[in-house]
Amino acid sequence: MDTPLRKDQDVPLRGIRANIVQSIRAFRVQDLQDAATALGHHFLYANLAHAQTKQDVLDMIGQQFKLPAHVGKNFDALYDSMTDPVHKSGPQPGFIAVLEHIPANVKCDKEAREQLLDIFRDTSDYKKKQKIPFRCFY
């Protein structure tokens, strides 16, 4: 007889802080999605493999996270969208976000990549103050 899955056990996030932005490393996207389901958290996923520019990255995150259209305008709009409470979004018990294949090229350089990750770090800090787990893997 199988023991039912409890929210605090048997998930790949055991030992990972509730509010963190870190390299995806040994995690598989499907495992992270399964963990979000087991924890009752929202799963946000953006595959940025075809992004060439900072603008492409913003557009793709906005589309794939299903954020308001203005998010694709700039990093400030992305931060606002990630931290502003949305009245129709329903309960927010926690989030697991995955940014897969962030580009590293001339049009989306290391500085733009760090700015993007800083937005998610700031979002994690903001959610921590609200006692909402927010983990981002890239």
Image: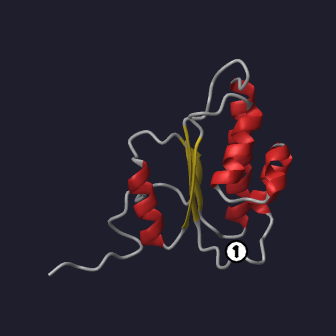
Does residue 32 appear to the left or right of 120 in the view shown?
left
Between 23 and 51, the residue placed more toward the observer is: 51
Q: Position of residue 65 (x, y in %)?
A: 65, 56
Residue 76 seen anywhere in this rendered image of the structure: yes
Does residue 52 appear to the left or right of 46 in the view shown?
right
Residue 121 seen anywhere in this rendered image of the structure: no
Vertically, is 10 above or below 109?
below
Q: Position of residue 71 (x, y in %)?
A: 80, 51
- Could you tell me which quadrant the N terminus lies in? bottom left
Between 18 and 95, the residue placed more toward the observer is: 95
Vertically, is 98 above or below 53?
below
- Could you tell me which quadrant the C terminus lies in? top right
Q: Position of residue 18 (x, y in %)?
A: 55, 60
- Which residue corresponds to the image point at 41% horizontal and 74% vertical from the top-left? 7
The residue where tag 1 is placed is: 89
Q: Amino acid at mark 1?
A: Ser
- Which residue corresponds to the image point at 48% horizontal and 65% vertical from the top-left? 36
